[in-house]
Amino acid sequence: METRSVRFRKEHRSQNTLRWLFAGLLGLILVLLVLFVWFSPVYIADESMLPTLEKGDTIFYDRLYKHFHAFDRGDMVVFRDANGNLLIKRIVALDGETVEARDSVLIIDGQYGLDEHRYTPSAPLDIPTTRVPEGTVFVLSDDRNYGEDSRNRSIGCLREESILGIVRIRIRDFTIFTRSP
């Protein structure tokens, strides 16, 4: 015959096991929600964002950011082009601003813009004066040789609602991005 304390220990052990299983399942659900609802992974297949992102990197972009924050100059954003391909570009001008480039000098609202020495300057960057319409942003590749950005008529000034998210994490050397102009 089992004593009351032996029965209590058996019940406590089974309840403890159930608690651990529940906690593990809850933790797994939270990790999956963060990775596939809040953040979304993208494999980098080209070199348009060199030197920041290299071909073969995997990035995670924050899908909820756009619902709670305004975009800033320097943010790297993910969006789809007309063919449905995912593109990653850097915001260089916000709505209501004018952007132009002469002799590889980026000028925003008549003042020098981003530090072009941080980006690939091998081809001369010339952009005619463009006013960024309300609700849109002007994006460029970090490797300025790539023309699949706002300089291309098929993309043009990018509507803010078409932006899927902002790049937060790069997986190569586990660098976590912060806002960098």
Image (tube, grey):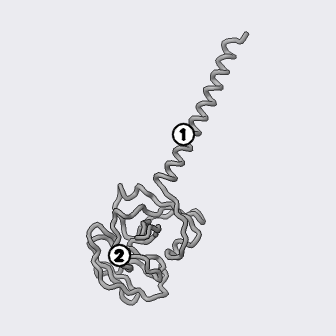
Q: Nearer the viewer, mark 1 or mark 2?
A: 2
Label drawn at residue 176: none
Going 61% across and 34% down the picture, which residue do you hit? 20
**Residue located beneath label 1 in the image:** 26
The x and y percentages for residue 34 are: 50, 50
Confirm whether residue 76 shows in the render.
no
Q: Distance between the residues labelled 1 and 2?
A: 44 Å
The x and y percentages for residue 23 are: 57, 37
Going 31% across and 69% down the picture, which residue do you hit? 136
Tell me if residue 75 comes above or below residue 118 in the rendering.
Answer: above
If you read the primary sequence from the N terminus, does the residue marked by circle 1 or circle 2 appear first?
A: 1
Going 27% across and 72% down the picture, which residue do you hit? 133
Disc 1 residue type?
Leu
The x and y percentages for residue 31 are: 54, 48
At mark 2, the secondary structure is loop
Disc 2 residue type?
Gly
In this view, which residue lies farthest toward the right?
1
20 vs 41, left or right, is right
At mark 1, the secondary structure is helix
Quadrant assignment, res 175: bottom right
Q: Quadrant of the N terminus?
A: top right
**Residue located beneath label 2 in the image:** 156
